[in-house]
Image (cartoon, rainbow, N blue to C red):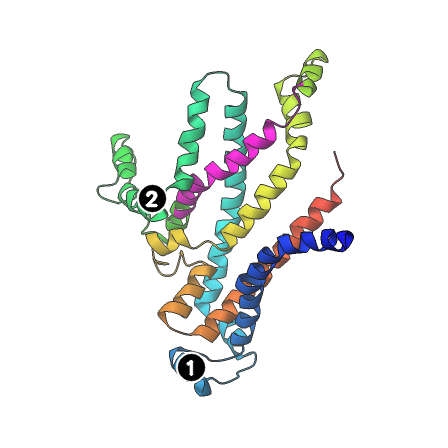
Amino acid sequence: MKGFTSNKTPYLFIAPAVILLILFSILPIFIALIISFTDIDLAGLADWSAISFVGLQNYKDIFADPVFIKSIYNTLFYVIFGVPLVIICSLGIALLINFGKSPIFKMFRVIFYMPSITNVVAIAVVWSYLYNPQFGLFNYILKLLHLPTIPWLQDPTMAKVSLIILALWRAIGVNMIIFLAALQGIPKEYYEAAQIDGANGWKQLTKITIPLLRYAIFFVSITTMIGWLQFFEEPFIMTKGGPLDSTTSVALFIYQNGFEFSKFGYAAAGSFILFIAIIIVTLVQFRLQNKEGHY
């Protein structure tokens, strides 16, 4: 009886988490899949008899939708430029803070972490003023330097770059903390031994620090990649997808079709395509990680 009880105990502890996962994660995925094969809209919510099964029509229509194709291009733009920038900047700042000897570096931890815990709406309001083409701080500085002003949120390409800068500023804090924790787990004896052997700072960084941070880098790259594939808050608040849909991400496209145009089946098809893309990207990253040898 004692053995039976002890065997059941772990399941009782994990049961609440598993039940919540099924109810709020697994089940919605299956519901979204079913909805994606229908033409459900607001009328369908009120009267289920108005809902028709349309098979793969939503998927055919969405791949023929130029706005969706543009949103894929925009999302790839965000991922290709945003993910490496977040990883490099977070790691660089973590290294500077970790190896910095001055007490001021402890204050930098708070400074760089604060944007990640600040409300995104408040951040967007401040950055909207910074990006203002006439009265913004950035263009004011450019004028002082006798440089041409920049249409930060008015030019299609520059608007994407501006959103990446804002998202980069927000994302550095959390990832910096992860890298700092990993850096402080590296035994100091490794560096002392390397210094005795005559290794300079660059050698220590590339032969000790970076290899021993590989799991932290992998974790940050996975979570950052997934976050940027679901890039939503910045374009939603700052540009509403404009100008000319140049900042519409896939997540924003799904939101607009689902909650603004009430095309729930169409939006569900888009969300399932995004879900599959995230799964594929994650599996590829795990595959690449497993191919690398253990250090």
In percent of width and height, residue 47 lies at: 41, 85
Q: Residue at x 39, y 43 (%)?
A: 166
Q: Quadrant of the C terminus?
A: top right
**Residue 48 visible to the viewer:** yes
Give the dominant element type of the magenta stretch: helix, strand or loop.
Answer: helix
The mark found on residue 11 in the picture is none
Q: Which residues are magenta?
A: 163-188
The one nearer the camera, 27 or 123, is: 27
The kind of residue on which mark 1 rests is Gly
Residue 274 location, quadrant? bottom right
Q: Quadrant of the N terminus?
A: bottom right
For residue 107, side relative to residue 199 (left or right): left
The kind of residue on which mark 2 rests is Ile
Question: Is the residue 46 above or below the residue 241 in the image?
Answer: below
In percent of width and height, residue 182 lies at: 60, 32
Could you tell which of marks 1 and 2 lies nearer the N-terminus? Answer: 1
Magenta span includes 270: no
For residue 137, side relative to residue 29 (left or right): left
**Residue 151 visible to the viewer:** no
Q: Residue at x 62, y 22 (%)?
A: 202
- The residue that label 2 is drawn on is 123
Whole-number angstrom distance, CA of label 1 to CA of label 2: 38 Å
Crowd rating for badge 1 (residues with CA inside 10 Å; few <14, some 14–19, many 20+) = some
- The residue that label 1 is drawn on is 44
Q: Is the residue under label 2 in contact with that under label 1 (CB below 8 Å)?
A: no
In percent of width and height, residue 132 lies at: 26, 45
For residue 194, side relative to residue 236 (left or right): right
Question: Is the residue 57 above or below the residue 253 in the image?
Answer: below
